[in-house]
Image: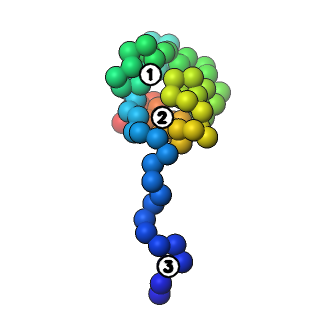
């Protein structure tokens, strides 16, 4: 059966961004790799309230708006969940 959508996934909207995530006493320390000025502590209270809101606020501030750079906040959210789960 032929697929109505030829090819694989679409082209990247923006260059790849990597995040460094470390546990800290009162939250998670997040930095965009290669941009030390982007280091920020996201408090545990904010993460418990909504990981999504916290990650998109960080990504919008340090990477750019979702419409321009793609779903970088979603990628960061997955990383934060993994670190919080201890993986």
What residue is rendered at 57% in x and 38% in y? 68
Q: Is residue 50 left or right of residue 2?
A: right
In this picture the colour scheme is rainbow
Residue 29 visible here? no
Image coordinates of residue 3 in percent, x first then y, are: 49, 79
Disc nearer the start of the sequence (1/2):
1
Residue where numbered disc 1 is placed: 30
The 10 Å Cα crowd at callout 2, few under 14, some 14 to 19, many 20 or more, is many
Image coordinates of residue 42 in percent, x first then y, are: 53, 19
What residue is rendered at 45% in x and 17% in y? 38
Determine the image quadrant of residue 56: top right
Is there a contact, CB below 8 Å, between mark 1 and mark 2? yes
Residue where numbered disc 2 is placed: 76
Residue 53 vs residue 26, the one in the foreground: 53
Secondary element type, mark 1: strand
Looking at the image, the residue that sits furthest to the bottom is: 1
What is the quadrant of the C terminus in the image? Answer: top left
Secondary element type, mark 3: loop
What residue is rendered at 50% in x and 28% in y? 63
What residue is rendered at 41% in x and 39% in y? 15
Disc nearer the start of the sequence (1/3):
3
Residue 18 visible here? yes
Image coordinates of residue 77 in percent, x first then y, are: 51, 36
Image coordinates of residue 62 in percent, x first then y, are: 51, 23
Disc nearer the start of the sequence (2/3):
3
Distance CA(mark 1)–CA(mark 2)? 9 Å
The 10 Å Cα crowd at callout 1, few under 14, some 14 to 19, many 20 or more, is many
Residue where numbered disc 3 is placed: 3
């Amino acid at each position: 059966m032929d697929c109505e959508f030829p090819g694989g996934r679409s082209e990247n909207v923006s260059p790849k961004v990597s995040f460094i995530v470390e546990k800290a006493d009162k939250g998670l320390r997040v930095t965009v790799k290669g941009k030390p000025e982007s280091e920020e502590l996201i408090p545990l209270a904010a993460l418990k309230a909504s990981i999504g809101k916290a990650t998109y606020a960080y990504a919008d501030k340090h990477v750019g708006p979702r419409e321009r750079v793609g779903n970088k906040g979603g990628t960061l959210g997955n990383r934060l969940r993994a670190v919080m789960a201890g993986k």
